[in-house]
Amino acid sequence: MTWNQQRQATAMRTGFEKPDDTLPQSMGEILAGMREVPARWQCPTCRRVWEQPRWVGADVVVWDVPGIKECPACDSLRMDWDSTLAEERRRRRAKDEWTRLCPPSYRKTEPARLPAKPLADILAWRYGPRGLLAIGPTDEGKTRSMFLLLRRLLDEGREIRAFDCAAFGHECGRRFMDGTGADWTDALAQVEVCFFDDLGKVPMTERVESELFAVVERRTANELPILATSNLTGADLVGKASADRGAPLVRRLREFCEVVVFGGRG
């Protein structure tokens, strides 16, 4: 039933207003025919009765019977409760996403056992256009430090996609086999945070390297951050990629990422 049909039905039932073409047809007509009258209300929650004016049509009869409406105190409590429930749902979603995102062994990370200065630099990162690149030898805590950062970002409500050294290539191949590759790379180019662990560790096919470069290019162009770890130097990364993509890829990572060094490597 449309709004006008509801008004007409109410008018015919109550006799407060005339039906059909005499009903106002616009919000301006409605407001022009309204008046403010004293009114009493009773809260259905605490049963308190209080006075608060309301707006009614010019020819509407107002009976001296309290209307039903939550009092300001109960309304505020309800809003607080709704906010608490929303926060609890958000925390639950973040926990579920953390379980999906982080391998079990990394969930047990003890921050005190990680190198203090690089860890502090990682955790000091704040969401913005410039990403974060952690470099250094293996077993220095790069990945564990990054996952601690990802946990904080999830708690902040950020949307994250994460890949280990092989996952990007595997999913890339599967997506382009089933015809969803373009949509997949579009999503990676737009997600709030994209994390690549052990970048360059596994040899890439022409297709995988091409799509990785495209994702990095689009994210940096659109000022969306990239988080990554690597055991390789810039020269190593250039050497592992094709001649026309290696240097541009490393150049973009250096330009759009803060570099944190683990294990004393310069």
Image (spheres, rainbow, N blue to C red):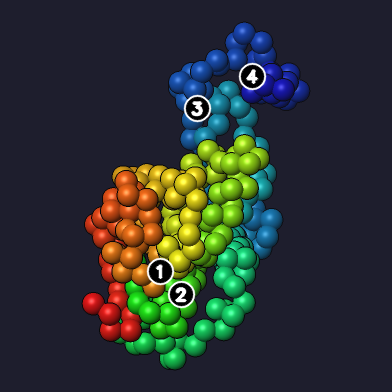
Quadrant of residue 153 in the image? bottom left
Say the numbered circle drawn on residue 34. Answer: 3
- Say which of 76 and 161 sits in front: 161
Amino acid identity at mark 4: Asn
Left or right of residue 34, residue 241 in this image = left
Numbered circle sitting on residue 4: 4
Q: Residue furthest bottom?
A: 113
Q: Is residue 25 left or right of residue 199?
A: right
- Give the class, few, some or many, for how many residues have Cα within 10 Å of label 3's Cα (few <14, many ≥20): some
Residue located beneath label 1 in the image:
229
Mark 4 or mark 1: whose residue is earlier in sequence: 4
Q: Name the amino acid type tagged 1.
A: Thr
- Residue 250, image x, y percentages: 30, 57
Q: Earlier in the sequence, mark 3 or mark 2?
A: 3
* Of marks 2 and 4, the one in the foreground: 2
State the CA–CA distance, disc 4 to disc 1: 62 Å
